[in-house]
Each structure stands twice: as structure tokens, then as C-alpha cells.
Image (cartoon, helix red, strand yellow):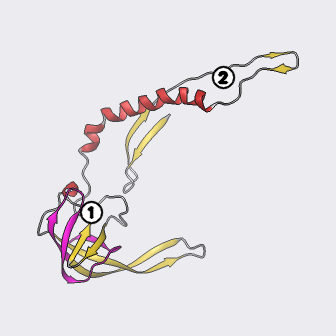
Amino acid sequence: MDVRLVNTTTAEIMSVAEGEGEKRFGGAAYKDINFQQSFDAGLAQEALRPAVEQVVERLAAQAGELASLAPPPGMANVVGARDGMANVVGARDANVYIDRGQNYDIRVGQRFAVHRVVDEITDAYGNVLDRVTERVGTVEVTRVLSQSSVCRIVEGDAQEGDTVQEER
């Protein structure tokens, strides 16, 4: 079993691990009778288990190196992010919630430009080729949580589905 951890932003291979397992299938033949064993998921699992355990051990040994990797400054590398930007994941009353917090070293007072998709260009098969975005506002962080932040709208607008990028 070969495993590669790939940075989905840069396509760089960050880590590689291998594991092996073995299980032989037996069989015999006598005259016109075949006693060959057919595929059995339980037997396959016996071969895969040691391979998976070896891969996990090797990746765990590299955990310190991988944990030290930081996201690019001002850009979120989070599940659901589009084009390297963090997402507005909710808006209630005067608050806007974004999907990065202490996990991205966000600070109270930090400001983000809010962008909204205003058009999508698709091909004949419906595949999105490009998204046309506009800056629609600015938000400022008022409270930082572990994996999200609460913001207030400084100017313009912000709504769920918009993206934010740190102002420079």
C-alpha cells in the first residue's frame, strides 16, 4: 500500500508512507475437480490490516514535521475554501461568522475584504470555467474562537457563501 499526503493548494507531495501485508490464497486440482479458493473479504482484510497499520505508524512518526507547516499568510487553507479564500459561514443580526480562528492565528481587529460570486462561466457540459467576483464589503474580527471568528460589518455587505481575504 502506497500513501501520499498532497497539499491541495500547491499539489506538493508533503509525505509518503508504505505498508505491506500478505495473504496467500490456496488451491488444488485433482483430475477434473478444482478446489481453488475464491475471493473472501475476511482474508483480504488479513492482508490489508498490517499494511494499514504500517502506514499509520509511519505517518504518525512524521506528525511533528507536518504540524509545523503553516498556511500561506492571509490565505485560508480550509475545507470548503475557494481560490484560497476563507468562507463566510453564517450571518445573524449584526454578526458575520468566518471559518478561521485561532487555528489560523486570527486576531481581534483584523479586517477582511468580502467577495461575492456574481457570475459563473460554464462550458457546454456545465463545468465551471471561471467565477466572476466583486468586492462587496469589509468585515472586522470582534471575537476569535478555536476554528472560527465572529466579525462585524464595517462597510458594504456580507452573507453566507461569500468569501473573505485579509486586507493588506
Query: How far across and how far down the image is residue 49, in percent?
Result: 49, 29
The residue lying furthest to the top in this view is: 30
Task: Determine which quarter of the picture holds residue 87.
Answer: bottom left
Q: State the extent of the magenta-drawn residues as a range.
A: 139-168
Tell me if label 1 and label 2 are in contact, CB under 8 Å: no
Indicate whether 3 appears above or below 119: above
Indicate whether 142 appears above or below 137: above
Query: Looking at the image, which residue is at 32% across and 58% down?
Result: 78
Q: How packed is label 2: few (under 14 Cα within 10 Å), some, or many (20 or more)?
A: few
Query: Looking at the image, which residue is at 26% across and 55% down?
Result: 71
Query: How far across and how far down the image is residue 39, in percent?
Result: 67, 31
Residue 61 or residue 29, whichever sits in front: 29
Indicate whether 147 appears above or below 36: below
Q: How packed is label 1: few (under 14 Cα within 10 Å), some, or many (20 or more)?
A: some
Query: Looking at the image, which residue is at 27% across and 63% down?
Result: 75
Inspect the image, locate mark 1, and give the three-letter code of the amino acid beneath it. Answer: Met
Which residue is denoted by mark 1 in the rendering?
A: 75
Residue 138 or residue 148, whichever sits in front: 148
Residue 43 or residue 119, whichever sits in front: 43
Inspect the image, locate mark 2, and give the three-letter code of the amino acid beneath it. Answer: Phe
Name the side, left or right, on which 158 lies relative to 11.
left
The residue lying furthest to the right in this view is: 32
Which residue is denoted by mark 2 in the rendering?
A: 25
**For the residue labelled by badge 1, is the local secondary structure a helix, a strand or a loop?**
loop
Q: Quadrant of the C terminus?
A: bottom left
**For the residue labelled by badge 2, is the local secondary structure a helix, a strand or a loop?**
loop
Prevailing SS of the magenta stretch: strand
Mark number displayed over residue 101: none
Pick whichever of labels 1 and 2 is earlier in the sequence.
2
